[in-house]
Structures are given as structure tokens and as C-alpha cells.
């Protein structure tokens, strides 16, 4: 018995999902739909930095978008730099 028109069987869904996860973006591996993936290590560094200084929850940090998270890192680092009199930022962006 075949599935009704417009629906997929569980095997078809699994194959489609498997093909999607194997696919590399147009810019090679490590990209998805043309957008480079953000390094996981960098994400953990930014989140731990903000959690340490601002005492925000994991959920709050995960709800920040990329640019907002980086902005908060810069702001906290600038405050630390000013208070410590150190010329080097606490959180350096490379």
C-alpha cells in the first residue's frame, strides 16, 4: 500500500534527512546552505565569559543571537579593561 499523494513514508523521511545531513554547502564542508558554521569552541568561550561576568543562565545566553552575544563580550571586556587599567581586553576577538 502506498502513501497518499503529498506525504512521505518514514523511510523516505529518513533518507531525505540523511541526504540533508551529508550535504555540504556550496562553499565546501563546514558550511550549511552557504553559511559558515560558527566554531563550537568559540561559542563556549563567549558563553562562559558572559556567564562568569554577568551570571546569566544557559537559556538566556542561548537566546542571544551571534552579533548580540559578541557585542556583550566586547562591552564586558571594555569595562574590565577600564577598571583594571590594563591595555589588553579581557576577551580578545581574533
Image: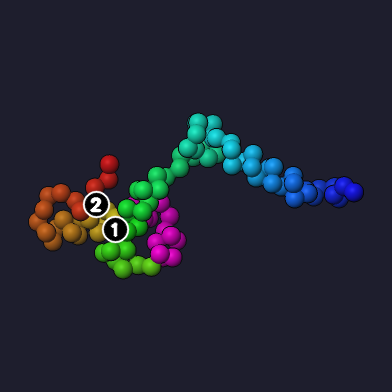
The CA distance from mark 1 to mark 2 is 8 Å
Q: Where is residue 8? Give x, y as percent.
A: 78, 48
The reply to whether residue 67 is in sight is no
Residue 31: image tag: none
Q: Where is residue 89? Give x, y as percent.
A: 19, 51
Count every numbered label the image shows and give the total: 2
In the foreground, 41 or 47: 41
Does 19 appear above or below 45? above
| Residue under label 1 | 49
Quarter of the image that includes the C terminus: top left
In the foreground, 30 or 87: 30
Q: Earlier in the sequence, mark 1 or mark 2?
A: 1
| Residue at image coords 36%, 48% | 41
12 on left or right of 82? right
Q: Are marks 1 and 2 in contact (CB under 8 Å)?
A: yes
Q: Callout 1: helix, strand or loop?
A: helix
Tell me the quarter of the picture where residue 15 sits. Answer: top right
State yes or no: residue 49 in magenta. no
Magenta span: chief secondary structure: helix
Tell me the quarter of the picture where residue 53 sits. Answer: bottom left
In the foreground, 41 or 85: 41
Report the magenta residues as a range: 58-71
| Residue at image coords 54%, 31% | 26
| Residue under label 2 | 91
Q: Where is residue 21? Give x, y as percent.
A: 59, 42
Name the outermost residue toward the right. Answer: 1
Crowdedness of circle 2 by 10 Å Cα count: few (<14), some, many (20+)?
A: some
30 on left or right of 23? left
83 on left or right of 18? left
Amino acid at each position: 500500500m502506498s502513501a497518499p499523494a503529498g506525504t512521505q513514508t518514514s523511510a523516505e523521511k529518513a533518507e531525505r534527512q540523511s541526504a540533508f545531513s551529508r550535504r555540504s554547502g556550496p562553499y565546501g564542508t563546514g558550511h550549511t546552505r552557504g553559511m559558515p558554521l560558527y566554531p563550537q569552541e568559540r561559542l563556549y568561550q563567549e558563553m562562559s565569559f558572559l556567564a562568569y561576568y554577568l551570571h546569566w543562565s544557559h537559556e538566556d545566553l542561548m537566546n542571544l543571537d551571534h552579533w548580540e552575544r559578541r557585542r556583550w563580550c566586547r562591552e564586558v571586556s571594555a569595562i574590565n579593561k577600564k577598571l583594571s587599567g590594563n591595555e589588553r581586553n579581557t576577551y580578545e576577538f581574533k
